[in-house]
């Protein structure tokens, strides 16, 4: 796990290595263990290193193989790198390190850009061919590792974070109106390739982009799960398949030259990970849970459940209790750690959790992704039985924060777009073949877009703010393929995630499986009051906010007068949604 950056120039123009040097400090938290820069003339790469596999200097990046004529920068982990190394050795390749980075170099030389189909893991990388000047950018299937891109005439820059690109300079930071519509409508998610800034784009998940020396490029999607039923199977067979694939996914993610812990919320997903690790003989496993002061009538922790799991499996468990003295300073720090504005209050929880966890381990497994692939959210059951023709409308009614026409009363006129672009985006997704039912179409959209640009990005940004590598076994692409093909009725059973609950039965304590669905409770954001409300008010009344004038003054005033009643369709605080965007823009 690391931070990567680079510049690719076209024609006779040389890359600006000083721009790379300006980016690297903004990536230091992602890679606190070292840095490097490679100057290849019209191509330059930079890297910040977090030592997880091959702790020696032989694993440092940017990594160059002069014999093969290749240089790579890589962020992530290829879990099957040992197997690939053995296969490549059989083809005559020799290795000078034990790192997965070197395996990527050799795999690219052997199989070209198609090497991505052989990698099991999470990755974003760039490979430069010295002789042709071609650069290949690639991102993993589920978009677990980020890659942001800024293009201008004669040049392309990329980085692991949006703020790093801004540090290089020369980026158009104006607001993308279509992205703003998505932020306000599509549950604060801006689908790739857009970001909220006009001058920054992101490489979509499961995508390879090949950039030639003259600046022309091609882009292709190399993987997509199929939400159809290719074979008939019994419920028991689906249950066994899910359990077996998750067991394999959890085992894969223990590959490291440092200890691996688990973020244990007390819910089914993280508890299942702990149970499977215990089944595999892992002893002395370190687990971590977080809790906050209660507020607004809501409890701030789920320690009762995480304690059950920790006791059952004998983990070395750590309860992290957060009081107001740590909470308020963490709000602005969390916003600063976001590559894009993310409205979920979970971000603050993950930021504070990561700060403490990183003092003890460098790698953790996390339960993120299970709800999106096993239908654990509230908006999936209402889609059951809805015709495919009506599916997009039904999904929008359940998931969108507000209808398109409401924006005219909330955004100032200059920020409005005429078309309901978010609705059209959903309709186009739902209209594609490869999803049998309305539930299938919703799960496909969520796993390709919402999952990537909300929960997954949240975990990546917050853990990497402290040099902590988070691994997500529920997003093992082979498990995602099984989950996608599983009939929706099996996933919707037992109030959601039915097939996963059946797979956990007998391994995870029943009181965890049968408990009501929980969330990462952060009452201080769900219910705005006191110093946090003051922070919100200051952000929305700041000179920068007045100059930008995104929101109608009467809408902002109404929310500030009643800060906790107006909610989005899914119950998020409308005032926090506005304030978070302004806070993020003001710290750029």
Image (tube, rainbow, N blue to C red):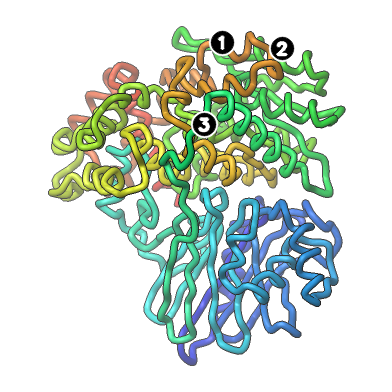
User: Dot 1, crowdedness within 10 Å: few (<14), some or many (≥20)?
Assistant: few
Numbered disc 3: secondary structure: loop
What residue sits right under mark 1 in the picture? 515
Image location (x, y in percent) of residue 554: 18, 30
The reply to whether residue 155 is in sight is yes
User: Dot 2, crowdedness within 10 Å: few (<14), some or many (≥20)?
Assistant: some
The reply to whether residue 583 is in sight is no
Residue 570 relative to residue 448: left or right: left
What residue sits right under mark 3 in the picture? 233
- Towards the viewer: 87 or 161: 87
Q: Quadrant of residue 380?
A: top left
What residue sits right under mark 2 in the picture? 308
- Earlier in the chain: of badge 1 and badge 2, it is 2
Residue for point 52% across, 59% down: 147
Residues tagged 1 and 3 counted as in contact (Cβ below 8 A): no
Residue for point 62% across, 52% down: 122
Image location (x, y in percent) of residue 109: 66, 76
- Towards the viewer: 391 or 181: 391
């Amino acid at each position: 796990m690391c931070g990567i950056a680079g510049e690719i120039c076209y024609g006779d123009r040389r890359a600006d290595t000083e721009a790379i040097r300006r980016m690297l400090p903004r990536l230091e938290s992602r890679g606190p263990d070292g840095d490097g820069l490679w100057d290849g003339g019209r191509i330059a790469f930079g890297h910040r290193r977090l030592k997880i596999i091959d702790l020696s200097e032989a694993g440092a990046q940017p990594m160059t193989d002069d014999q093969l004529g290749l240089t790579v920068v890589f962020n992530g982990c290829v879990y099957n790198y040992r197997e690939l190394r053995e296969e490549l050795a059989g083809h005559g390749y020799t290795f000078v390190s034990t790192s997965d980075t070197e395996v990527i170099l050799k795999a690219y030389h052997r199989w070209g850009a198609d090497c991505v189909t052989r990698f099991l893991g999470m990755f974003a990388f760039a490979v430069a061919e010295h002789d042709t000047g071609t650069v290949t950018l690639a991102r993993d299937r589920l978009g677990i590792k980020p890659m942001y891109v800024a293009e201008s005439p004669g040049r392309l820059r990329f980085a692991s974070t949006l703020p790093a690109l801004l540090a290089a300079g020369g980026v158009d930071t104006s607001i993308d109106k279509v992205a703003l519509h998505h932020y306000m409508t599509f549950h604060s998610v801006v689908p790739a390739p857009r970001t909220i800034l006009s001058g920054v784009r992101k490489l979509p998940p499961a995508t390879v982009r090949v950039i030639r020396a003259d600046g022309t490029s091609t882009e292709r999607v190399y993987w997509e799960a199929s939400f159809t039923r290719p074979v008939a199977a019994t419920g028991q067979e689906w249950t066994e398949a899910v359990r077996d694939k998750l067991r394999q996914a959890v085992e894969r993610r223990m590959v490291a030259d440092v200890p691996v812990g688990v973020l244990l919320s007390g819910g089914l997903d993280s508890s299942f990970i702990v149970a499977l690790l215990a089944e595999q003989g892992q002893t002395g496993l370190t687990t971590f849970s977080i809790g906050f002061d209660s507020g607004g009538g809501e409890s701030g922790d789920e320690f009762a459940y995480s304690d059950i799991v920790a006791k059952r499996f004998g983990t070395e468990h750590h309860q992290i209790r957060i009081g107001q003295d740590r909470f308020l300073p963490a709000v602005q720090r969390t916003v600063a750690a976001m590559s894009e504005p993310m409205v979920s209050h979970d971000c603050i929880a993950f930021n504070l959790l990561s700060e403490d966890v990183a003092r003890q381990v460098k790698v953790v497994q996390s339960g993120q992704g299970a709800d999106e692939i096993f239908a654990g959210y509230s908006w999936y059951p209402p889609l059951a039985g809805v015709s495919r023709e009506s599916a997009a409308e039904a999904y929008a009614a359940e998931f969108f924060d507000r209808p398109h026409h409401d924006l005219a009363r909330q955004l100032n006129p200059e920020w409005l777009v005429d078309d309901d672009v978010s609705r059209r985006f959903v309709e186009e997704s739902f209209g594609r073949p490869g999803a049998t039912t309305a539930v299938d179409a919703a799960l496909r959209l969520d796993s390709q877009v919402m999952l990537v640009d909300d929960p997954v990005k949240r975990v990546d940004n917050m853990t990497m703010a402290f040099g902590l590598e988070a691994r997500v076994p529920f997003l093992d692409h082979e498990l995602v393929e099984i989950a996608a093909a599983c009939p929706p009725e099996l996933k919707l059973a037992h109030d959601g995630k039915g097939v996963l609950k059946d797979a956990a039965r007998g391994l995870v304590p029943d009181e965890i499986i049968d408990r009501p669905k929980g969330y990462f409770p952060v009452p201080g954001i769900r219910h705005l009051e006191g110093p946090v409300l003051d922070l919100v008010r200051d952000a929305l009344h700041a000179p920068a906010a007045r100059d930008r004038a995104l929101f109608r003054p009467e809408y902002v005033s109404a929310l500030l007068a009643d800060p906790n009643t107006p909610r989005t369709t899914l119950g998020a605080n409308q005032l926090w949604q506005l304030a978070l965007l302004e806070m993020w823009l003001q710290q750029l």
